[in-house]
Amino acid sequence: MRLRGRGREASAPPADVADEDVKGEALLREASLERLERAITALKDEQRTCITLFHLKGLTYAEVATRTGFSLEEVRSHLQNGRRNLRLMLNDDADRN
């Protein structure tokens, strides 16, 4: 493939570049998911349980409370603290990389 102007050849056909971009994005997503999994695992049990049930399983506050035996206030607190701790861990991890 020739580029207009100076007669140079492109280093890779556009399809190959697009494939590399897709592969690169997939690797970044996989790395991000691994970081998230490690951060969730590092949470206190109560926070991890509430985060998992609410955000990953899609349960409501009331359903999380029923399933765990926590009060609604405890569920809200564990979710708030869990989100904050995840954010801190993920930001700290990103700063190190």
Image (cartoon, helix red, strand yellow):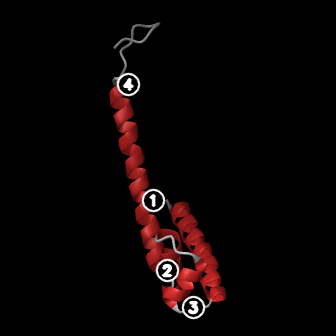
Q: How would you rate the neighbour count of disc 1 (Cα within 10 Å): few for under 14, some for 14-19, many for 20 or more? A: some
In the picture provided, is 91 more to the left or to the right than 19?
right
Name the residue: 49% across, 80% down: 48
Residue 14 numbered tag: 4
Disc with the residue nearer the chain's start (2 vs 1): 1
Find the residue positioned furthest to the right. 73
Q: N-terminal of the two: label 3 or label 2?
A: 2
Q: CA distance from mark 3 to mark 2?
A: 13 Å
The amino acid at mark 2 is Arg
Residue at the spot of label 2: 48
Q: Helix, strand or loop at disc 1? A: helix
Q: Is residue 40 visible?
A: yes
Circles 2 and 1 in contact, beta carbons < 8 Å: no
- Quadrant containing the N terminus is top left
**Residue 55, x across and y down, in percent:** 52, 70
Which of the two marks, 4 or 2, is nearer to us in this view?
2
Q: Which residue matches tag 1?
A: 32
Residue displayed at 59% across by 71% down? 88
- Calculate the distance from the C-alpha at mark 2 to the C-alpha at mark 1: 18 Å
User: Where residue 97 sits: x, y (%)?
Assistant: 49, 59
- The amino acid sitting under disc 1 is Ser
What is the secondary structure assignment of the residue under circle 2? helix
The three-letter code of the residue at mark 3 reads: Phe
Tally of numbered discs: 4
The answer to which of 61 and 7 lies nearer the viewer is 61
Residue 63 rendering spot, x and y as whole percentages: 54, 81
Q: Residue at x 53, y 61 (%)?
A: 94
Q: In this rendering, is residue 10 above or below 79?
A: above
* Contact? badges 4 and 1 (CB < 8 Å): no
What's the residue type where badge 4 is placed? Pro
